[in-house]
Amino acid sequence: MRAYQLKLNLTRLGIYGIVAFLALLCIVPFYLMIVNASRTNMEILSGISFTPGNALVDNFLTLNLGKADPVSGIRSYPIDILAGYWHSFLIAGSSTVITGYFGAMTGYAFALYNFRFKKLLWGMILAIIMLPSSVGLIGYYKLMSSLNLLETWWPMILPAVSSPFAAFFLRQYISRSLSRSLVEASRIDGAREMTIFHRVCLPLAMPGIATLAILSFLGSWNNYLGPLLIITKMELFTLPQWIAQLNGSVYARDRGTIFMGITLSIIPVLIMFSVFSRYLIDGISAGSVKE
Amino acid sequence: MKLKKIDNFAFVMILPFFLGFLIFTLYPVFNTLVTSFTDESLSSFDAPAFVGLDNYLSEITSELFWKSFTNTWMIWLPNIATQIGLALFLAAVFTNYELNIRGKGFFRAVFFFPNIVTITTVAVLVGALFDWQSGAVNQLLHGADKTGYTNWFGQGLTIQWVIAGVQTWTWFGYTAITLMAGIQAMPKELFEAALIDGASGRQIFFRIVLPFIQPIMVYVMITSLIGGMNMFDLPWVMFPGGQGGADQGAITMSVYMYARAFAWDQNLGSGSAVAWIVFVLIAVFTLLYLKATYGNKSSEEGIN
């Protein structure tokens, strides 16, 4: 028994070692990023450091106002992270509202009604989840071009109406949380179908919708390919576009500014993570197990 | 009769979804197919002409297309192997009743964090950390002596390793959470019965847990395959403009498709053909994988 305990404890120790190492791998790159955001280009070139430097304000100014010309002092090529925040927030916010509402409506219809072609249509929704986005990319660009929607945010917002994952996720949630008898009781009371959806289904499904909303907000917030395809005007750039701008630009030689840029870009995600990480993880678990 | 009428209201409710699906998903896919048979180009004002299978033939015989194909697999294979390995290990360890690991919630959250960070941010971060002269990775491995520094982006193979490593890093936590959820959904009686029969923790994992979570493994593999074959953001931002770095090592199939259509020669026809070839390849590999997994299941069941 003691030998068994000893072996168990040794195994446990080894496992804690591996797990702690993996945790460090996940944290240290971000820590170094934050530290380097406060160091000068020279300091970063000369070696690694785990303690912050004094160039935080300088790097922030270079990033937001642009790089100063060494002779004239005129600043050029600013990275407008603030505008990026705002644009990404507008796009992610509106597409999340649309995804949540129509995803719930579609999920509700599949959970509570029996109609013709139901199985076929549901099979279609499951199939689209697996459809790789690249296969329609060029057609999508052409469609948006012919609708005169290039250089606008609509192409990133409108498709939110048909998110197959939202329909899938919320159908599961609604069939578990909403009882048929409650819906039928409302019908007997004379409520219209749409009213039942709005007054009975939506409030009861709110926790599920909230989880889905967080997932879909993140998805939209992190979307890069869409804006890359549609938007070329800098005044409309989303956050991922501004970040991508850091690579291969005039900043390529200025490491501290690059680190400042990506550090700022991570703040909203970090806030969302610290508030919602439990819901996110639950959402992933729920989305994969129920099949 | 009245119920039938009520049920038909469902069509009103699913109408917006399927209308959106038709316009924003199905039509573009179809339009891409049509475009792939033409010589449509963004840089030409002439009306596109029908060219039959020309685009497909020239892509299938194009060296760079097949290079992008190999690159994509050279990135995806090491990634999925390490990712599944790590995730299975973590899932097994975290759900093991004997080991009773503490701080699961904390570790789960930490492992998951890289997954929600914008991939463009990750791309810029990785580019800076793996930089030859100023990157923290070399500085950490070799100290101040720059002579031993590895030029990570100096050759195709190391570029692919770095990208594969980053992919693993962003997804192993997610995959571990998915697998853990599957294991936790197992009926307790299964474990109890195995324990009573005197099965060891290892036996329980390989003989009971693994077969039980096989559907989830299939789901993980297929979504990762689709995502991997479509990988774009990371290589595109790390090597802007689709040049793919040294040896063109970061030109994945999606990068190649995008660059053909929108960057290099703005040839929408060729790009569309590439998109459809990739789509067919993904479908073929998915089917092959499913066949390999489920095709010989009946014979396995015979043994058990």
Image (cartoon, coloured by chain):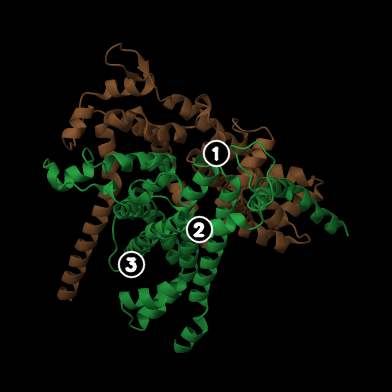
**On-image quarter of the N terminus of chain A:** bottom left
Which colour denotes chain A? Answer: brown
Residue type beneath disc 1? Leu
Q: Amino acid at mark 2?
A: Ile
Looking at the image, residue A257 sits to the left or right of residue A198; the answer is: left
Q: Residue furthest toward the bottom?
A: B302
Horizontal side of residue A109 vs B190, given as left or right: right
User: Would you name the residue on which mark 3 appears?
Assistant: B96
Question: Circle 2 — which element?
Answer: helix
Which chain is assigned green?
B
Mark 2 to mark 1 CA distance (whole Å) = 20 Å
Sooner in the amino-acid sequence: mark 2 or mark 3 = 3
Q: Is residue B73 above or below residue B288?
A: above
Residue lying at 24% horizontally and 23% vertically, measured from the top left: A55
Q: For the C terminus of chain A, give its image quadrant.
A: bottom right
Front residue of A121/A198: it is: A121
**Number of the label disc, if any, that sits on residue B226:** 2
What is the crowding at mark 1: few (fewer than 14 residues within 10 Å), some, or many (at least 20)?
A: some
Amino acid type, callout 3: Asn
Q: In the image, residue A34 lies at what x, y percent?
A: 28, 34
Q: Identify the residue position indicated by label 1 in the image.
A: A229
